[in-house]
Amino acid sequence: MNLQRILTVSRKTLRSLRHDRRTVAFLVLVPLLMIALFGYTFGGDLKDVKVDIVNLDQGVLDHALGNDISLELRNTSVLKVVDYYGPGVQNASAVSSSLEKVKRAEIWACVVIDQNFTVEVLKGVFNMSHGLPVVPAKVRIEVDSTNPNIAAAIVAEVQKAVQRVLTERYGIVPPIGIEMSKVYGQDARFIDFFAPGVMGLAAMMVTFMLSIISFVHERSAFTLERVQTSPITEGEFVAGYALAFGLVGLVQSSVILGAAMLLFNIQIVGSPLVVLFIIFLLAVGVQGLGFLLSTLARTEFQAIQFLPLILFPSILLAGVFWPLEAVPEVLRPVSGFIPLTYAVDASRSVMIRGWGPEQVWVQLLILAAFAVAMLLLSALSLKRRG
């Protein structure tokens, strides 16, 4: 091998990169974006998990331990208490209204402190000191367990709050019965939480990659110019591509869904057809986004540069691998602008909660609006270029 010729080729390659400002920016900015997003989001602690507290504790001698535990829970950074009912709430309406909020997925859990909690704790302290049997004081948690990590975090926070309060007051902690009742996800595992996100992510990645590269290739091969001289309108051309790539996303999702059911026995409480329709809407919208971004690229190499700019924020901020409650608060608003967020949320609700289109209509409407907007903008962009 001739070292001089090798160096000549290297200089030529570097010289060509130097004149491509977009590529130079890509080489510098994308690694910064990746390390910043990974550093801020990967393995983040859960924060602001929405719960309600229903304090039924009647207390003893004008003091109720339920008040102290409720205050402890309201001061934790992990939980965000949306509504607090108490102290001394005796009717069942507070529990019922809070439970309905869990069923509507407005909060993750309802923490109910038993009305005899203080009495049972005092009995427990006395019995423990005299070697007598102890009846545990009760705290009930009605939890949405579609995300096992969040459910476990809520139970852990309640346990820690009870232990801190009782240790500070009595120096010992008598047995406490924390009963977790799962409103959704009775048998959910992490794979059940994980699968809907992977389906949406896979459809988005492949659809975006194929669409943006295909459109750049069509333009470089002058196919678009030939199409514009034919009777096919710009809208028909874009719609045809959208249908094709939407079907590609459906096939991908069907393969993932079937494999997950056969290999990992994931649970699907709702209709698989609704899940596939959600993925179809996502794929159509992403295809339109790929077309729009392709207008900014002259070659397939430049088109590839858009992939990390779109995919990495989607992977890290759309709740695919960890809940949005683990995303830093400063980055959470960004999740609302990522279509994958709504596709993943809707798919999980259908697959784990068993919801139908009437419960996920907001996510469906957002995905449909995204798809229509991208298709219209793509058609207008094609028409303008023509």
Image (spheres, rainbow, N blue to C red):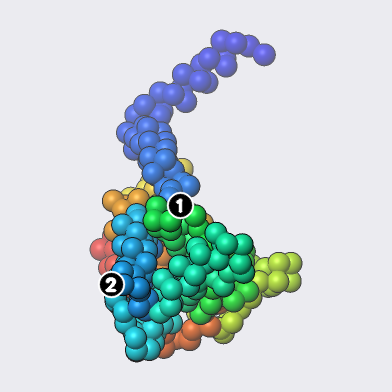
Q: Which mark is residue 171?
A: 1
Q: Is residue 11 visible?
A: yes
Tell me the tag on residue 68: none
Near-viewer residue (56 or 316):
56
Q: Give above or below for 14 relative to 303.
A: above
Residue carrying label 2: 62
The numbered mark, 2 or 1, whose residue comes first in the sequence reads 2
Vertical comparison of 18 with 315: above or below: above
Residue drawn at the location 67% of the way across and 13% of the way down: 1
Mark 1 is surrounded, within 10 Å at the Cα level, by few (under 14), some (14 to 19) or many (20 or more) other residues, namely: few
Where does residue 153 sit, x and y in percent of width and height?
A: 48, 60
Q: Secondary structure at mark 1?
A: loop
| Amino acid type indicated by mark 2 | Asp
Label 1 sits on what residue type?
Answer: Gly
Location of residue 272 (image quadrant) = bottom right
Q: Quadrant of residue 251?
A: bottom right
